[in-house]
Amino acid sequence: MSKQDDFSRRGFLTATGALLGTAALGAHSPAARAAAPISSGAHVAALVVGTGYGGSVAALRLAEAGVNVHLIEMGQAWDTPGPDGKIFCNTREPDYRSYWLRTRTKAPLNYFLGFPIDRDIPRHAGILDAEEFGGITVYQGRGVGGGSLVNGGMAVTPRRENFAAVLPSVNPDEMYATYYPRANAALGVGTVDPAWFDTTACYQYARVGRKHAQRSGFPFVFVPDVYDWNYMKQEAAGTVPQSALAGEILYGNNHGKKSLQKTYLARATATGRVTVSPLHRVTSVAPAPGGAYTVVIEQLNTTGDTVATKTVTADRVFFAAGSVGTSKLLVKLKATGALPALNGEIGKGWGDNGNVMCGRANHLWDPTGALQSAIPCCGIDNWAAGGAFAEVAPLPTGIETFASFYLSITNNPHRAQFSWNGAAGKVELNWQTAWKQPSIEMAKSIFDKINSKEGTIYRTDLFGVYKIWGDHLTYHPLGGAVLNKATDNYGRLTAYPGLYVIDGALIPGNTTVNPFVTITALAERNIERIIAADL
């Protein structure tokens, strides 16, 4: 065999806190079920670290090229129903399935009317990781499918005129002619039916957002998404189980959202060449004799304990653990001597995609609706004039709130760096909360004007006591192994042939919109070149 072949009130308050962050971020299909976890001593042609957008693209395209692929995923497979018969828990009642190895929830919006609303939960390998660094909390998906499990599915291609600032070393012609269309088609991207949008009760909140934006002179745009819009229409008609209209998103979606499990990973596993090991975590990658790599992997149980440590050999390794996961691992491997020849750009260029959140209190004559779809479908575009794009986000609490909520993506210039703290034995990030101020000012370029026009005020009870801005988090981590700096222009770690970065770590901190379509399209571009040139 060739080397390549081997190759209640409480419930309402909790729902409020859990759901307000969803904009950032059919029947469930267990497409990536692992037949058996990887064995110690195994030799694989291609090992992919992570099952998010970049890793899923790599797995599919490598398998189609005839390469056997093993995917390593730190989180669960999410293919087994819980006691309630559902794969994922509801955001109104977060349980053991909700958070990654936490004993208390950490909702993106964790106050209401000035009162904290987080709750105690059992420690478990849940679906949403709220990873805390010194100056920021980074929300990430944990499970087979990565961030696609927990985001709002907003599938946005950046405007062509903004692309040079996103990926300056990449030819925009090939991206917009080939790789963005390829990514959008494979992800199943679609747009809400405007006529249905104008009449359905579940988007009354978005229509209020449109009215306020347009009266203040801002462009209002419909935003593509990977939700099954026909399914959502059936939800509204009451003919199928509710999912988006039941507020399911932040801790997974049981029905209508086309996560990677239903798209790239389903196609990858259907090739017969892709195997997945959930609840496995890569801790080391180092050169092995003959040009391969020795990979050390910890197997976890559902409470986060290491139950086995395995050593395998891989001819090629693709780092796709997400911006934070890939950056942390590479920084550690460089500093501790496993991969000392990685260049000095490793760990640099990390950004938060300019994320900042806020809410506005509307007048009584502008109700936003008791029923709100958890899937956002529109936004306010003030990027050219004010450096901000604001999603009109849901507030699906089940009651009328007379409030509008927004997640803004802004042109924040600040970039942070990951570094190894040898004394503490961990990787740290030097982001400072004060660096969010440019994002706040850019978001204010929209909402100060709307408030002035409408005679409304900011909500001050959602992120603490008398605190207007959600400046403590990001849903869109980017950078840390920047393309054409930490790697070559196709993600190769050139000091180590056969090692690649293929996820959001390649993108220097900002995409001007929700990033996952750009991550997917860039992965499509890079893996096509890698297969043609390196295999």
Image (cartoon, rainbow, N blue to C red):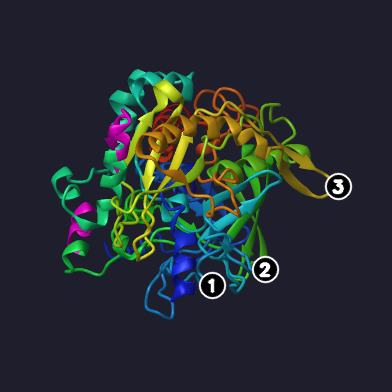
* Image coords of residue 277 (percent x, y): 51, 60
- For badge 2, the amino acid type reads Asp
| Residue at the spot of label 3 | 423
Q: Which mark is residue 305?
A: 2
Give the left or right position of residue 462, taking residue 160 as reference: right
Callout 1 crowding tier (Cα within 10 Å): few <14, some 14–19, many ≥20: many
User: In front here: 65 or 524?
Assistant: 524
Across and down, in percent, residue 246 comes to: 32, 66
Single out the mark in the foreground, 2 or 1: 1
Q: Using the rendered image of the protein, determine whether residue 480 is visible from the camera's viewpoint.
A: no
The magenta span reads: 212-234
Residue 379 lies in quadrant: top left
| Mark 2 neighbour class, 10 Å CA radius: few under 14, some 14 to 19, many 20 or more | few
Of the two numbered discs 3 and 2 on the same chain, state the one appearing first in sequence: 2
Please count the marks in the image.
3
The residues tagged by marks 3 and 2 sit, at their Cα atoms, a distance apart of: 23 Å
Foreground tag (3 vs 2): 3
